[in-house]
Image (cartoon, rainbow, N blue to C red):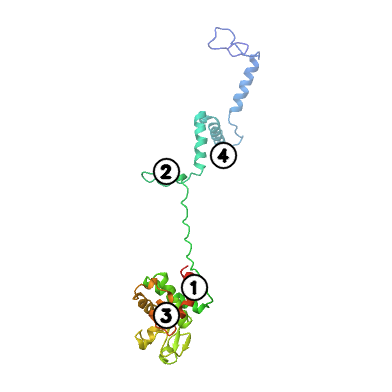
Amino acid sequence: MRNDGNLDDPFGSGRPADRSDDTPSTDRLTTLRGLARRTRFWAPTNPRPGRTKLAVATGAACCLGLVGVSQAGFGAPDRAAGPAPSAEVAERAAVDPASRAMARPSAAPATPGTDPSASATASPKATAKPKPKKTVRQIVPVAGLDRTQMNNAKKIVQAGKEMGMPRRALVIAVATAMQESTLLNYASGVLPESQSYPHQAIGWDHDSVGLFQQRPSSGWGTVEQLMDPEYATKAFLSALAEIPGWQNLPLSVAAQAVQISAFPDAYAQHEWRAGEVVAEILG
């Protein structure tokens, strides 16, 4: 120590120590002594054991708090974010969420041997159109006949078709019924039994009944059978088919050969009308 009261550099060569400022050594010594006095713990003149312990504990707690704050603020390692992702990684991250957000069509498993792309673009099958319902042609009365007469003529034509008879036979049968019964199903006043069957008129020509006025007593059939238009027609046509060359005979001759009527020439007058009726029924 020098006489001027300044601190000497213990490692110096006897020269004053280098200083960063021009503060006199006396002032520096005074400052250091003041700091040393302030760092000492202050104790009251008459200390009490309890208060002294409390002051010491409080000071220790404060010091520990300062240490904790210094460690939390400065001592903890700085968890800095890692290096920024490259542009390629950022682009993939942006595309991937977007692709998951897009709606993807659900594709059915492809059948072996088929082209999935073709099935996706194939046009739907055309719906089959319902078949139109067949309409029954309405047969209208012709040749001056009413509905009842036309219905009876239709029964004659249908029975002949079932037998496979040609059109000429159908025309002869209709013309004969026009002459015999005016195409009405007659019962007989002589045979009360005939009136128990469906009929449209009552006649008194012996026991003649039905569309063709056939007589049960002549062997044409029973009363019940002859009152049935279908049976009566087939009985007439069966007898016509047994006449040799009936197809080439005049209508009146062919009809008379079957009926053996007292007026053989009366059948010819109905030929044109019978042809018109058959044509309407056959269509």
Out of 239 and 56, give the one closest to the viewer. Answer: 239
Mark 3 lies on residue: 229
The quarter of the image holding the N terminus is: top right
Name the amino acid, label 2: Pro
- Report how far apart the C-alphas of labels 4 and 2 lie in the structure: 88 Å
Name the amino acid, label 3: Pro
Q: If you read the primary sequence from the N terminus, does the residue marked by circle 3 or circle 4 appear first?
A: 4
Circle 4 SS class:
helix
Mark 4 lies on residue: 54
Query: Residue 119: x percent and y percent?
Result: 43, 45
Q: Which mark is residue 272?
A: 1
Name the amino acid, label 1: Trp
> Does residue 31 show up?
yes
Classify 111 as above or below 87.
below
Mark 2 lies on residue: 116
- Report which quarter residue 164 is drawn in: bottom left
The number of callouts visible is 4
Classify 136 as above or below 147.
above
Q: If you read the primary sequence from the N terminus, does the residue marked by circle 4 or circle 1 appear first?
A: 4
Out of 191 and 167, give the one closest to the viewer. Answer: 167
Q: If you read the primary sequence from the N terminus, does the residue marked by circle 4 or circle 2 appear first?
A: 4
